[in-house]
Image (cartoon, coloured by chain):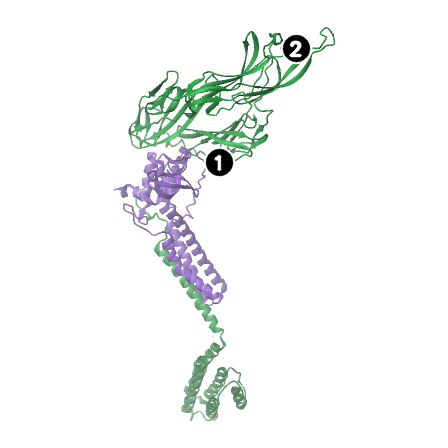
């Protein structure tokens, strides 16, 4: 097989594999009893209002969870970003920590995950059309290179989003919703001093064991905590008043 | 010069723990001031086999309390003796403190450097400077030697100048009952330099030093001595007969030798140093087990204790921790007291907020207090009742078990409210939250998984691109094939030249049409057999065609067509149009045959 043949074969395999891998790698959606499907559409205003209400009640943990979820849907909304910053600042104020320096993202370039997926796909499509037509029409080499580069950018962007989705599936983002959450060793592990997480702290979750869930911070597992003290951001819509009813 | 030694004051200090012990310490604070670490080494001079205590205290503003360990040290046994944690929440600010005590027991002489201990929380870092532990027999357990008392030289004959005595305050005790061991060095001569002492073996005892060595004057049998006393509190951990081994003290005394002629004016007493080593007698202790049938909740405390329970306040907010502190204070081995159980009714959650032990070594006996903090959190308004805390211990003086229960404490839990709660109250000048929205939307997905449409679009894009590139490559490869190029040229002859010839026939120009067809046939034959025959005479052309594989049948057909075209070319146009049309059809068929031959 010639070099070009191998290239074409690789591209064809990639084209077939991408959707298959995307479906499987991001995780099969197994419905769980009593759980709202995470791909159901949620209303950003309902989440924002629930977060603002929690913020006014002083419930910093729930406020951060609701507002993070609202920001996923409507990341450029000024009111969501403002209230989220206030909630996070209050959480840090209570904890007395200065370890994180939050940078409020510029609303002009922030995209929701759904928008990012579509933009990556459209970049890939535009690149494929330009590159393909340039190849067929024997247009200038520059146009072909431009189209191929655009396709590559789109596919790479799409792949990076896929990695992020996979990380979210494996270690979902969560927020501590109780004032103080004790993170200690599992019952069968060697005893050690517990970590204390404050309300509003953002963590990632790992394995589960009964009522306990593994807590991960900065990619490292720091211990186990009760599941009831945490909300997954993707599940926040379940706790809004409209969903609760 | 008589009594020269008596003019020297009696003072010594031996470094065996306590506040007067030589020690090294370092406190490092992070730039923000919210994290600090302090390491204290006490003493910083020990003999091989002796014990130095490294105390590491970490203070962190916030919930994150980092841990720190002492790295392995060469020729030093490092034992973690214990950790005490403290948790405080004042005005919504959380501060945690941990104090970890390590025992360092060097095995050989030399200088041991403890590297900087570093802690970090987020971007805050704090570290200590290196600490140095000097291990030498000469420098360990040293202190200023006791100086003899005035009149020591006038002691009766037979009275010892220096001697060592080890005593205990009682020789029969209960398990875990406190015994005070006193090692005493009596001296009425001048001791030069420091006193080295080797602690006795105390297998079967938990030992706690009772501060620095103490010194005073005592009179024994009418003779006044300077006395150095090293008290140690012992707690037997086994029953039966236990032995406290002999303690050894090594020091150097100044012997004053009088001259032979006391009336000589030049006679000056000579001072000769003399090394001495004294050993105390071993002591036997009888340890009785505790009486049977201990009360419920008894966990081994022996001594004299009291229990106190303290709760933050009568009210708290829902969601805020309510701190309950149980303090056990008294005489005994406070370090080994197990924390009493603190429980509450009406609290949603509870967690151990910290514990701390404070020991007072300044008295004749070891006393101290142990604090246990438990935080309770109620999610909803109501009442949280801190249940009575019970503590039981054995009183060796009364020879019976005792127990004490605290009163219960009620805490009213008020609704959690940001505007009133300390934790959530916005500080003056802080930004106010934006108002709630009245309209719905936008809606979207909270999951980060790819939408099916975008997945399909990317797949289609990659496939379409691959197909286009593959097609273009195949087309380019075909165009590089000479056979294909010749076939395309034949197609062009039929489509362009012969079509034009037909058009000329229609315009009543058969001669020009015949010439055009003749040229096309020439070119077509050349393309068929891959030879350039343009402009060649007919005979030469046929020769070349034969040389490139043309068969006689094909040459004959070609010759026939050429002759027919030539005839038309030389004939008047009015009479030959039909023939020209027929000849052009024949040429087109021949060229078509050539193409089929090539395609085969």
Residue that mark 1 sits on: B120
Task: Label the purple chain with its letter.
Answer: A
Residue that mark 2 sits on: B4
Secondary structure under the numbered disc 1 in the rendered image:
strand
- Quadrant containing the N terminus of chain B is top right
Left or right of B117? Residue B288 is left
Do pointers 1 and 2 mark residues of a single chain?
yes
- Quadrant containing the C terminus of chain B is bottom left
Residue B437: image location, x then y, percent: 32, 42
Outermost residue toward the left in this view? A245
Residue B528: image location, x then y, percent: 48, 83
Outermost residue toward the top in this view? B263
Q: Is residue A170 visible?
A: yes
Rendered view: A34 above or below B476 = above
Residue B241: quadrant of the picture: top left
Between the residue at mark 1 and the residue at mark 2, the CA separation in whole angstroms equals 60 Å
Rendered view: A81 above or below B166 = below
Residue B360: image location, x then y, percent: 46, 20
Rendered view: B479 above or below B508 = above
Give me the chain letter of mark 2: B
Local crowd at mark 2 within 10 Å, few (<14), some, or many (≥20)?
some
Secondary structure under the numbered disc 2 in the rendered image:
helix
Local crowd at mark 1 within 10 Å, few (<14), some, or many (≥20)?
many
- Mark sitting earlier along the chain (1/2): 2
- Please identify which colour was used for chain B in the image: green
Left or right of A83? Residue B77 is right
Identify which residue, B278 or A206, lies in the foreground. Answer: B278
């Amino acid at each position: 097989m010639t070099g070009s043949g191998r290239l074409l074969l690789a591209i064809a395999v990639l084209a077939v594999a991408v959707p298959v891998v995307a479906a499987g790698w991001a995780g099969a959606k197994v419905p769980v009893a009593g759980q709202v499907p995470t791909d159901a559409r949620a209303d950003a205003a309902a989440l924002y209002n629930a977060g603002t209400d929690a913020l006014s009640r002083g419930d910093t943990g729930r406020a951060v969870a609701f507002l993070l979820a609202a920001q996923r849907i409507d990341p450029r909304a000024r009111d969501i970003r403002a209230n989220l910053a206030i909630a996070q600042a209050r959480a840090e104020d209570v904890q007395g920590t200065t370890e994180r320096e939050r940078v409020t993202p510029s609303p002009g370039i922030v995209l929701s995950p759904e928008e990012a997926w579509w933009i990556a796909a459209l970049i890939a499509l535009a690149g494929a059309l330009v590159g393909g037509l340039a190849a067929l029409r024997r247009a200038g080499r520059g146009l072909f290179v431009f189209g191929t580069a655009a396709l590559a950018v789109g596919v790479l962007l799409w792949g990076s989003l896929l990695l992020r989705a996979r990380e979210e599936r494996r270690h979902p983002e969560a927020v501590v919703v109780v004032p103080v959450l004790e993170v200690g060793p599992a019952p069968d592990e060697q005893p050690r001093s517990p970590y204390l997480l404050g309300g509003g702290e953002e963590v990632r979750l790992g394995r589960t064991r009964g009522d306990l869930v593994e807590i991960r911070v900065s990619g490292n597992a720091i211990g186990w905590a009760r599941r009831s003290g945490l909300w997954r951001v993707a599940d926040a819509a379940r706790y809004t008043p409209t969903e609760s009813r | 010069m008589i009594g020269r030694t008596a003019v020297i004051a009696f003072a010594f200090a031996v470094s065996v723990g306590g506040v007067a012990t030589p020690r090294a310490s370092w406190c490092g604070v992070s730039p923000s001031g919210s994290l600090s670490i302090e390491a204290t080494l006490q003493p910083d001079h020990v003999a091989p086999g002796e014990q130095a205590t490294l105390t590491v205290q970490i203070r962190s503003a916030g919930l994150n309390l980092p841990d720190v360990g002492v790295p392995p040290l060469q020729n030093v046994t490092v034992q973690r003796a214990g950790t005490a944690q403290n948790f405080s929440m004042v005005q919504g600010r959380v501060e945690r403190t941990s104090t970890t005590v390590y025992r360092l027991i060097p095995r050989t002489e030399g200088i041991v450097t403890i590297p900087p201990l570093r802690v970090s929380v987020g971007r805050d870092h704090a570290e200590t400077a290196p600490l140095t532990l000097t291990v030498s027999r000469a420098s360990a357990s040293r202190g200023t030697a006791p100086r003899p008392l005035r009149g020591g030289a006038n002691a009766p004959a037979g009275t010892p100048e220096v001697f060592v005595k080890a005593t205990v305050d009682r020789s029969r005790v209960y398990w875990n009952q406190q015994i005070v061991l006193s090692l005493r060095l009596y001296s009425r001569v001048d001791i030069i330099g420091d006193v080295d002492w080797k602690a006795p073996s105390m297998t079967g005892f938990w030992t706690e030093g009772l501060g620095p060595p103490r010194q005073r004057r005592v009179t024994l049998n009418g003779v006044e001595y300077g006395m150095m006393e090293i008290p140690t509190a012992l707690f037997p951990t086994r029953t039966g007969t236990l032995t406290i081994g002999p303690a050894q003290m090594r020091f150097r005394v100044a012997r004053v030798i009088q001259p032979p002629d006391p009336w000589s004016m030049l006679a000056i007493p000579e001072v000769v140093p003399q090394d001495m080593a004294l050993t105390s007698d071993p002591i036997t202790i009888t340890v009785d087990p505790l009486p049977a049938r201990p009360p419920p909740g008894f966990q081994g405390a022996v001594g004299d204790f009291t229990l106190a329970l303290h709760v933050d306040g009568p009210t708290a907010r829902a969601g805020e921790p309510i701190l309950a502190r149980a303090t056990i204070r008294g005489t005994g081995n406070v370090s080994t007291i197990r924390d009493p159980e603190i429980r509450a009714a009406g609290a949603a959650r509870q967690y151990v907020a910290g514990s701390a032990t404070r020991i007072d070594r300044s008295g004749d006996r070891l006393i101290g207090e142990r604090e246990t903090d438990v935080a309770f959190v109620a999610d909803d308004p109501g009442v949280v009742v801190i249940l009575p805390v019970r503590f039981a211990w054995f009183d060796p003086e009364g020879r019976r078990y005792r127990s004490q229960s605290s009163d219960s404490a009620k805490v009213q839990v008020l609704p959690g409210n940001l505007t009133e709660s300390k934790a959530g109250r916005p500080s003056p000048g802080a930004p106010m939250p934006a108002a709630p929205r009245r309209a719905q939307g936008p809606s979207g997905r909270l999951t980060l998984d790819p939408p099916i449409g975008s997945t399909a679009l990317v797949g289609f894009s990659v496939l379409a691109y691959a197909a286009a590139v593959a097609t273009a490559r195949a087309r380019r490869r075909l165009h590089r094939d000479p056979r294909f190029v010749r076939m395309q040229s034949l197609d062009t002859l039929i489509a362009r030249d012969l079509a034009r010839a037909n058009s000329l026939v229609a315009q009543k120009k058969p001669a020009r049409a015949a010439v055009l067809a003749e040229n096309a046939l020439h070119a077509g034959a050349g393309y068929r057999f891959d030879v350039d025959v343009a402009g060649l005479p007919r005979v030469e052309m046929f020769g070349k065609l034969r040389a490139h594989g043309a068969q006689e049948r094909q040459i004959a057909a070609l010759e026939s067509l050429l002759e027919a075209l030539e005839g038309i070319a030389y004939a008047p146009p009015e009479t030959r149009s039909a023939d020209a049309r027929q000849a052009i059809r024949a040429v087109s068929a021949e060229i078509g045959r050539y193409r089929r031959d090539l395609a085969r």
